[in-house]
Image (tube, rainbow, N blue to C red):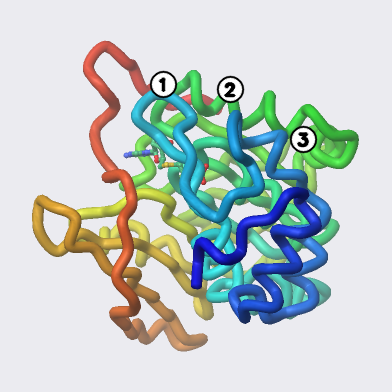
């Protein structure tokens, strides 16, 4: 099914994902149509397969991006008026999915992409800077890229002047709906060895995480969906089998700066 979604243009690719049932929501379709994968994938951008982006990283296949966004959608869009959405994209790599998510969170929401290789964090920003829409997302602060170890999640510092007022620290207390920490949705773009408890803790109630988890050291990986309900109860569900690059320590010689 997956490879059949390849197209000759961005529109053709998205239409194929739609007619193959991989994109099901019109909102997701509109977001995918608004972001040109050619700004993010250095070769064969409209092929429905992962592509190398250097540094042993890949931009995931379009059908995987579609599955991730469809799974997280209600935590990225619904209720935006009541409470601005906060979304974390761990292992942001090319930055493609980070931009799609930022298109969906709406004004007042924020998407933070965390990458442990500084060059890839910069690549994500550079790729997003190729379109006027991407530049606007970066300039407004709705989309931000950070360098850090995603296994620990991310505590976004309080917003600077001019940034949307949704950047409270992850452990800040509930109360001020606009400045509360944690994340409505967490996407993990690399295979973890476990369902990192710190990430579960950083989920808001309610909130949802989409995370590939490797059951062994090899390629035996599955998508897990972690749901936290409004009372804080956590349910974990194993989904389909996948192949992601691993969530690891940064390669030797790369220093992860905890950058603000
Ligand atoms: N969502 C990205 C996927 C990139 S591949 C895209 O589609 O473009 C996975 C990414 O996870 C790589 O860029 C890799 O550098 C990053 N990564 C691996 N371990 C990490 C960690 N501990 N913290 C943050 N990023 C990590």
> Considering only order in the chain, which callout, 2 or 1, is on the residue closer to the N terminus?
2
Between the C-alphas of marks 1 and 2, the distance is 13 Å
Viewer-nearest of discs 3 and 2:
2
26 shown above or below 219: below
- Image quarter for ligand 1 equals top left
What residue does disc 1 label? 257
Q: Please say if the residues under marks 1 and 3 sit with CB atoms less than 8 Å apart.
A: no
Badge 3 marks a residue whose secondary structure is helix
Which is nearer the N-term, disc 1 or disc 3? 3
Judging by the rendered image, the residue that carries numbered circle 3 is 138
Write the residue at 26% across / 62% down: 213
Q: Quadrant of residue 91?
A: top left
Viewed as shown, does residue 26 lie left or right of 204?
right
Q: In terms of sequence position, does the residue under pointer 3 or pointer 2 come before the other?
A: 2
Percent of width and height locating residue 249? 24, 32
Across and down, in percent, residue 237 comes to: 32, 83
Read off the residue under disc 2: 122
């Amino acid at each position: 099914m997956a490879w059949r979604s390849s197209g000759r243009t961005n529109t053709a690719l998205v239409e194929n994902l739609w007619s193959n049932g991989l994109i099901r929501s019109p909102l997701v379709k509109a977001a995918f149509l608004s972001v040109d994968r050619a700004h993010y994938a250095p070769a064969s951008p409209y092929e429905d397969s992962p592509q190398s982006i250097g540094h042993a990283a890949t931009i995931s296949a379009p059908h995987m991006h579609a599955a991730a966004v469809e799974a997280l959608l209600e935590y990225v869009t619904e209720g935006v008026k009541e409470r601005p959405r906060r979304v974390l994209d761990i292992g942001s790599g090319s930055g493609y999915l980070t931009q799609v998510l930022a298109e969906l969170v709406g004004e007042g929401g924020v998407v933070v992409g965390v990458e442990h290789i500084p060059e890839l964090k910069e690549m994500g920003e550079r790729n997003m800077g190729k379109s006027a829409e991407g530049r606007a997302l970066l300039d407004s602060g709705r989309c931000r890229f950070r360098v850090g170890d995603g296994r620990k999640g991310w505590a976004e510092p309080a917003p600077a002047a001019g940034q949307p007022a949704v950047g409270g620290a992850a452990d800040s207390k509930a109360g001020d709906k606009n400045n509360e920490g944690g994340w409505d949705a967490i996407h993990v773009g690399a295979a973890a060895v476990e369902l990192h408890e710190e990430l579960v803790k950083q989920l808001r109630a309610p909130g949802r995480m989409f995370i590939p988890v490797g059951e062994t050291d090899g390629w035996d990986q599955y998508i897990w969906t972690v749901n936290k309900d409004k009372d804080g109860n956590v349910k974990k569900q194993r989904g389909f089998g996948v192949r992601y690059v691993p969530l690891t320590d940064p390669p030797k010689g790369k220093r992860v700066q905890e950058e603000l």
